[in-house]
Image (tube, rainbow, N blue to C red):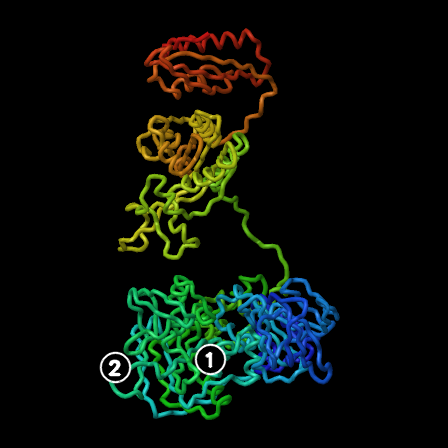
Amino acid sequence: MLISKKWLEDFLVLPKKIKSEDIGHDLTMKTVEVEKINNLAHSLQKVVVGVITKVEKHSNADTLKVCQVDAGKNYGQLQIVCGGMNLKENMKVALALVGAKVHWHGQDELFELAKVKLRGEESNGMICASDELGLEEMFPKQDEKEIMDLSYLDAKEGVLLSSALGLDDTIFDIDNKSMTHRSDLWGHYGIARELSAFYNIKLKPLNPKKISVGKNTKLTVEIKDSELCPRYLGLVVNNIKIEPSPDWMQKRLMAVGVRPINNVVDVTNYVMHEIGQPMHAFDAREILTKVGTDKNKKIVVQRAKDGETFKALDGKEYKLKLTDLVIADSQRTIALAGIMGGENSEIKNDTNTIIFESANFDAKTIRKTSTRLGLRTDSSTRFEKSLDRESAELAMRRAVELLQKISPDVKVASVLVDVYKKKLKANAIKLGEFDIAKKIGFNIPKIEIIRSLKSFGFTVAIKGKDLAVVPPSWRSERDIVSKEDVIEEVVRLYGYDKIPSSLPCLPIVVSRKNQSRTIERLLKNCLSMEFGYSEAHNYSFVAPGMIEKMGESTEKYIELDNPIAKDRPYIRRSLLTNLLENAEYNLHRFESIKLFEVGKVYILEEDGVLAEKGSKKHLPAQVVNLGVVLSQKNNVNPFFAMSEAIELALNKVGVLNIDFVYNTKSANLLHSGRGALVVSNGIELGFVGELNPIVQDKIGIPYRIAVCELSVANILKCVTEKSEYTPLSHFPSVERDIAFVVDKKIQHKDILKMINNFHELIESCELFDIYQSDKIGEDKKSMAYHIVYRSSSKTLEAKVVDDIHTKVLDSLKNNFSADIRE
């Protein structure tokens, strides 16, 4: 938001010793964040208003024109070569003289102008576009080569542009995010009130004269839901003549980034930037009535009809819902409450009677409608902050006062209608004698506390040793609700930077370890460091096309009403949806991919968490999962590589009793014969397997790919051992490979368990091959294992290893009827 120093000075007399930089610093330290301070006149030195007296084509360039420009008596007639497309004689322009600094064609760097020849023609300066002077927000360009047309300005040639535009001012650029909770600061008067408290100077009251009573037109207002509209004021004003607002008003609006339109619209914008209360003006001729004369007007504040369409002032048509709040006449919607007026009631050049609106709307309703429709306006930005209900009348009085000031013939044509169904009464907040000291660590004198609060408009009553504090109306809506809020007001005026530093006196408590995060970190480290997987971070949103390719229906997915990306309106139920999309993209560029992701998935089922007591709607279960994908061009058995990595990763976190059980649950997603459930101690952790070839083809993945998805919560349930540090052995290992033929029904997990538990010198055992062929038997399979022997206390002798290895072979023969292959 832009704040004009000149405008602030309408309400208080700032001491000369207080510089603009001091104001910016104090506002930042005590109230809001001032991002920058712009001295507009300084940036527009040597830029004047010029009048084009002659325009000719350039003899050597089709896109250039040679202009004669009257720059006033101090500079005379100057020849300027310019490429603007909208140049014409008698047009007032922004003329940058030789020595002026401009943003050449809108570039960031400033460029100092000099007298030059362009294609043989002398040019003594530059006729500027708005972006070349940093005024693009004030004068948005309709075309790339559009020059600023200042013909509407009442300014003589040669006058400094900063003076002509009212930009001989200092503008404070305030970060909107720093005052989202302070609805009272969205106008100049609110900022002036803060400065008055900072510097202990008198704030001039903003007390517009009362509105006279008109009798020409009868206006009635009906509010159908006072929760959505606590207050609505309406007033008919006639004898209107639509014309430009006076120079002083236009300059002030332009200084804060508002483009002047006409006297009526400019008044509503002026009031909004002065008080912070948005207003609207309807063409009274367009307010339709069912019965009676044209002098009977009725405004209705109501919910929109579900599915109705509304054409707003921006020319766009919007489809409304029952949750939207609208302003209507007796037959149709004429405005989207608090956001934008309708095209059917806009002010036209021949409008002679208007209806002023000043109201208070429910913040949440305005926010929801504005967000859903993607329609953000200065008005909606303010209403969604919960405005002061009392400011609605103040704004109406100020608007009438201003309109009659700039257009003296204007008359009030009706009674001021004020429907105020739900007044807000602020409750007193008790502030104990030591409450502030408990929060900030030292005492502030009571007299200083009272002075601080009163300077911000609070009412303070002394109740024994305590204080009863009542916030003003402009802070009562949802801002000041607890004693902590009151303490903050005292401390920020005192100065956060003045609080003495002291060490906190707190009991030392051992922090509680988040076991889930520990598990996640260990899984990530194992997969990335030991197996070379890369971690992916995907958005939680998925495309309907990808859901269908996975063989699922979108019915079980949560659909967003207002998605960030329109092509991804659903929230993921599985990490694999996006990981497989990553795999498809990368495998067309590389020959292998190893990816994993740890993140939340959102499951909307009947066993979800109830949104509210008695409600049939459910919130989605938010589950943290581990998703993994692996594909390599030359790897014909990615399932085994994936299983090995998953098993080792689970072992690392303390899940030891792992079984891979034949999987029938994920038949659509996984290959029918190459998938397994991952189970530990009877708890299902997830699944691992090779992707179904049909799904693989639909997605467009060129190579066989293994996938895995596990529940981190279930992994945590199966952690049976605490991690203990075991030093690495300094002694060499001895490695042996064995291959044998067994029946097909014998499972790898049983063989692995037997070998690993056979002897303490067996460090690890790994399956590296499975082979099936008619040569070894129809119901047989060949399995090959790699066994590592190591001692932590000595170097193993070959004879010791051979003896143990022989016993392993004998055990395989006895337990599994294995036929050892030589």
Q: Is residue 69 left or right of residue 336?
A: right
Q: What separation in Å lies between label 1 and label 2 (alpha carbons)?
A: 28 Å
Q: Which residue is mark 2?
A: 290
Disc number for residue 436: none
Give the camera-side residue of 621 and 356.
356
The answer to whether residue 147 is above or below residue 508 is below
Residue at 41% across, 19% down: 753
Q: Residue placed at 52% from the left, 63% from the top?
A: 177
Instruction: Depth check: give the residue in front, 499 or 582.
Output: 582
* Local SS, label 2: loop
The x, y position of residue 210, in whole percent, is 44, 89
- From this view, report whether residue 286 is shown above or below residue 573: below
Residue that carries the numbered disc 1 in the rendered image: 265
Residue 363 seen by the camera: yes
Residue at position x 39%, y 20% from top? 748
Q: Earlier in the sequence, mark 1 or mark 2?
A: 1
* Amino acid tagged 1: Val
